[in-house]
Image: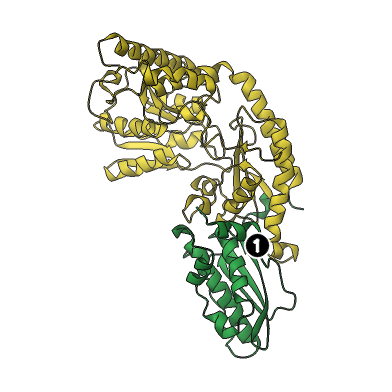
Amino acid sequence: MGNKTIYLDHAATTYVKPEVFDAMKPYFCEYFGNASSIYSIGRESKKAVEEAREKVAKAIGAQPREIYFTGSGSEADNWALKGIAAAYKKKGNHIITSVIEHPAILNTCKYLEGEGFEITYLPVDEDGLVSLEDVRNSIKDSTILISIMFANNEIGTIQPIQEIGAIAREKGVLFHTDAVQAVGNIPIDVEKLNVDLLSLSGHKFYGPKGIGALYIKKGVKIASLIHGGQQERGKRASTENIPNIVGLGKAIELATENMEKYNKKLIDLREKTIEGLMAKVPYIKLNGHRTQRLPGNVNFSFQFIEGESLLLMLDMKGICGSSGSACSSGSLDPSHVLLAIGLSHEIAHGSLRLSFGDENTEEDVEFILEEIPKIVSRLRDMSPLYEAVKNKQKV
Amino acid sequence: MYSEKVMDHFTNPRNVGEIEDANGIGQVGNAKCGDIMKMYLKIEDNIIVDAKFKTFGCGAAVATSSMATELVKGKTVEEAMKITNKAVAEALDGLPPAKMHCSNLAEEAIAAALEDYRRNIGEASNETVDCTGCCNSCGHSHGREEDFDEE
């Protein structure tokens, strides 16, 4: 393996595919016109934006006029929640979400609580799934929005979005889903799924960073998050980031075209990793739903060791992963997601997320199945907690 | 994020392990916080002739444990008692601000092991050294072992 880097953190970000980069390049120096300008190079930019909008819409079963470009997935999440809260506050002040949402949702909800909104944070079960009964029972007359993530960024669990959407539709409540981890990775059709608003982000599926989009179903009212000019049909001011918009369009087109073949490979790598590590490493726990999870997501807790140490040792072997350990995040508390699925702090500290992508191979899996058990063993040999187990003491 | 020295001590930790006939053993920290340091000292004629450690924690926790054992070896009990967290951090060419608590643990682990030694030779009371780890909650609730595949 030598100095090869095995990148297994695609849930954090992906590289930009050469085809995507090639599509973006002309819009930096050649077709640089402002899309709001009337002359031809401006019209060229405007055309590129609308072509990208069509591609994004097609990928998620929406109409182009229902797609609004944003600066990121977090901005799309913020806009969905704050925009709906402001537009529907006369109807009610209650929003339902879950405890395992991304900080872009949770911190926006906290902000809205400060503005007088009431937020219900639904719990999840040990697999990370929201209960449909909880969703139904939490709806009140004052409920204006349900926001449940499509797939969790840490443990990969995919929520029953269609069923949640059906409940929301039946009760006359709007439904937003943060689909940043899902779009480009699993098939999505907003019509079939009863979704009213959906957030996505380009750099999760081999597009550029700094570009996202919000799907807003026709007829849904929303207040603007960014005020200024008339871009995005007056709903989101700011000069369009043409190269990134073009990149987003190209990336989502490629991801959708190759999804079935791509997912088959990712699931194969995921399953080999899960089965291999479960067989080779004692005191291990798979986090997230066993099968209802993102194709490329693996998340384990290794008892008696700490995640940051594990990540550093993996890095020395050229393996890039992620952890929900507190020490890797600069916080003293481990991941809120791992705590929400019932892990104790000390076990949550020893977690590892590996997220596969299209450049990963079976050879990569063989390498990590060889190295991870050795690293875990080395760290456990250093751990006073494991020493107690070895000495048959109570841990 | 980490200095070369921190990475060196993390990659090649010095003095990992146990001392079977240690006469000063101290453990500080809390698994709930993500850091536990256990320090073993062998003290002869008031001189620390050997020091080893075991640590559950992040890269900084391992590196500070390693450096702490290096610093105490060869010192008298009195000299070792004066080793501060700042000295451990400086010996590692510094730690990121968020990781300074690991150097506190190193200082406390040395103190706890020396306290144990003084108890063993009848110079201190039998009071235990409380956990002064990185959090305020020392409710020691370990994981659900039934969730794990055991050896």
Decide: is B150 above or below A181: below
Q: Is residue B52 above or below residue A272?
A: below
> Viewer-proximal residue, B67 or A87?
B67
Asked if residue A333 can be seen in this view, the reply is yes
Q: Residue B104, position in %: x, y?
A: 50, 69
Chain letter corresponding to the colour green: B
Which chain does the residue under circle 1 lie in?
Answer: B
Mark 1: few, some, or many residues within 10 Å (few <14, many ≥20)? some
Q: Is residue A63 above or below residue A381?
A: above
Q: Find chain A in the image and tell me its colour.
A: yellow
Rendered location of residue B138, percent (x, y): 52, 66
In the visual, does A375 lie left or right of A48? right
Q: Nearer the viewer, residue A234 or A123?
A: A234
Residue visible at 69% across and 33% down? Answer: A271
Q: Secondary structure at mark 1?
A: loop
Which residue corresponds to mark 1?
A: B13
